[in-house]
Structure formats: structure tokens, C-alpha cells
Image (cartoon, rainbow, N blue to C red):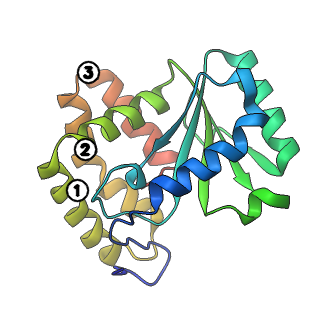
Amino acid sequence: MILYSSHVIQVVDSNPEWPSQFRRIAQFIQPAVGDSAASIEHVGSTSVPGLAAKPVIDISIIVPDPHASRCAIEGLVGMGYRHCGDLGISGREALRAERGEVAALPRHNLYVCLADGVGIRNHLAVRDRLRRDPAAVAAYGALKRALAVEHADDVDGYTQAKSDFLSRILLEEGLGEDLVERIRDENTTGDTDG
């Protein structure tokens, strides 16, 4: 495994264990979210085979409405997660593993997302495009490696520097200029993956 930064931003070569790590975490949290979840999705760069990424599994629990979101969050908090709020991304609630068995799981970011929310539409559009476009995977991986060195201890700079590339993908995937601009604005102020 090649590490492209030794500071805050660490981008590593794709790890074939990431999908199984996602499945392990998803199986573990499924009982806590129960029927509240429409699906549990592996998102972010670790969900794309062959893509260099920060070695953190990003997981989105997709729920149909705010009531289901509250139910899922309550169940997850009961397991040992801390609810962190939306972190500037509308329609997405972040949770962090803090105690108990969840703290022993592979390192991950966990989100509860409204099915029609901007945050999940962004993640799924990028993930699905990259999964079917090897040239985009190569270009994005190279960009992330370079940015991990350039912005080694600047998470905000790293995130902002990826914006043009990701915005192009979102536009090509038909999200529309207004929505892409909104996503860009939220990602500038919110917590992001990848």
C-alpha cells in the first residue's frame, strides 16, 4: 500500500478489503436501523474499485423521511455512535463511532440521509459514474494523490481543490447547474469524504 501523505490527508492505493469492511459494518448496524432504512450504501472513494482513497469507509443509510431518520439515529446512538448533526450538508446527519463495539469496527464515517436529499444524490451520482468509467477513476485518483501532498494538513484546501473535478461529473450526470452549485457550496462549508 502506498501512502501519499503522512499528515492529516492520507490517500492510499485501493484496498480490495474495503467492500468486505463495508459489509461487516453494514451487517453490524442493520439491527439498529431496522425498517427505518430503505438501504445501506457504500459511498465515497472506498466504494469504487481501483480508486485511491483516504482509508475510511463512508456509509450512507438512506431513509424515506425525517421520522425514519430520527428512528435510525436513535438506534445508532444506542449502539455507541455520537450524533454530530448535519455538518453543513442538508438532508444528511453525521454519526461518529465513539464507544462500545462500534469503536472496534474498521474506521468509517456514517451518515443517515434522506432519500431525496442533496448529500445522497451527490454521493450516488459520483460513485455510480466512477464505477463505470475507468478513465475518470484514473484521473480522480491521480488528482487525489497530488492534492494529498499539496494540501497534506489542510482538509478544507484538499476538499475545495477537488470541487471542479467532482462538479464536472455531477453536471455530466445530469444534476443541473443550480443543484451542482448548491452541492459545491455545502461541500465548501460541510464535512466531506474521499
What whole-number distance in Å separates the C-alpha atoms at marks 2 and 3? 18 Å
Q: Is residue 98 visible?
A: no
The residue tagged 2 is: 130
Q: Is residue 111 left or right of residue 130?
A: right
Q: Amino acid at mark 1?
A: Tyr
Q: Earlier in the sequence, mark 2 or mark 1?
A: 2
What whole-number distance in Å separates the C-alpha atoms at marks 2 and 1? 9 Å
User: Going 29% across and 64% down the picture, which residue do you hit?
Assistant: 144
Q: Judge by depth and name the residue closer to the eye, 35 or 149.
A: 35
Number of numbered discs visible in the structure rendering: 3
User: Residue 168, which numbered label?
Assistant: none
Q: Judge by depth and name the residue closer to the eye, 113 or 101.
A: 101
**Quadrant the C terminus occupies:** bottom left
User: Residue 176, which numbered label?
Assistant: 3
Task: Name the secondary structure under disc 1.
Answer: helix
Mark 3 surroundings: few (<14), some (14-19) or many (≥20) residues within 10 A? few
User: Going 46% across and 53% down the picture, which residue do you hit?
Assistant: 19
User: Residue 140, which numbered label?
Assistant: 1
- The reply to whether callout 3 and callout 1 are in contact (CB within 8 Å) is no
- The reply to whether callout 2 and callout 1 are in contact (CB within 8 Å) is yes
Q: Is residue 157 visible?
A: yes
Q: Amino acid at mark 3?
A: Gly
Which tag is nearer the camera, tag 3 or tag 1?
A: 1
Q: Amino acid at mark 2?
A: Leu
What whole-number distance in Å separates the C-alpha atoms at marks 3 and 1? 21 Å
User: Going 15% across and 50% down the picture, which residue do you hit?
Assistant: 134
Which tag is nearer the camera, tag 2 or tag 1?
A: 2
Mark 2 surroundings: few (<14), some (14-19) or many (≥20) residues within 10 A? many
